[in-house]
Image (cartoon, rainbow, N blue to C red):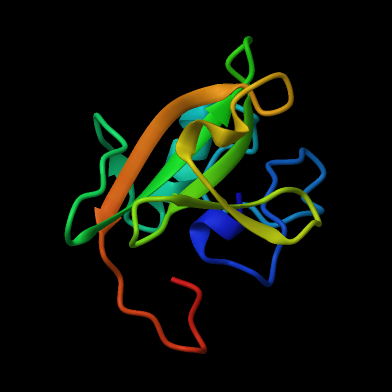
Amino acid sequence: MAWAAWDSDRWWEPDTFGIYYWPPNVPREATLEASALAYGTLGYGRCSDSDLEVGFEKVAIFADTSGTPTHAARQLPNGRWTSKCGQLEDIEHGLDGLAGDEYGHVAVILKRPLQRRNASSPS
């Protein structure tokens, strides 16, 4: 989830022990609503499609068959998506490229206005 949020310094996970980073004031629970709220702290809101949209950046949250979030991917300027699969290297893929038994399906698409980045700020 951190990679999709432009955060390469912390591991994002709503663990109940508070070991990993999770945005303040967001319930520490593995639900789509809590995941959407976590990205909401960065200015993301729900949207209806995954199409490339000029002036916006998008995040896709994947979920398993029970609706539990499993993964998140960030859209690249070329319309493809980038993910970090656990501790492995980051990859570029089509949105449905990770759909299946391990990550489930795309359950939520979020977007925010395109952010200007500098070396010292992940968002």
Nearer to the camera, 97 or 107? 97
Can residue 11 be seen here? The reply is yes
Rendered residue at 74%/61% (across/down): 89
Counting from the top left corner in percent of width and height, residue 94 is at: 48, 41
Q: Is residue 95 above or below residue 116?
A: above
| Left/right of residue 41 with respect to residue 92 in the rendered view | left
Q: Residue furthest top?
A: 66
Nearer to the camera, 69 or 94? 94
| Left/right of residue 55 with respect to residue 24 in the rendered view | left
Q: Residue furthest bottom?
A: 119
What is the quadrant of residue 115 in the picture? bottom left
Can residue 24 be seen here? The reply is no
Rendered residue at 33%/50% (across/down): 44
Nearer to the camera, 6 or 38? 6
Q: Is residue 27 above or below residue 107?
A: below
Counting from the top left corner in percent of width and height, residue 3 is at: 59, 59
Q: Quadrant of the C terminus?
A: bottom left
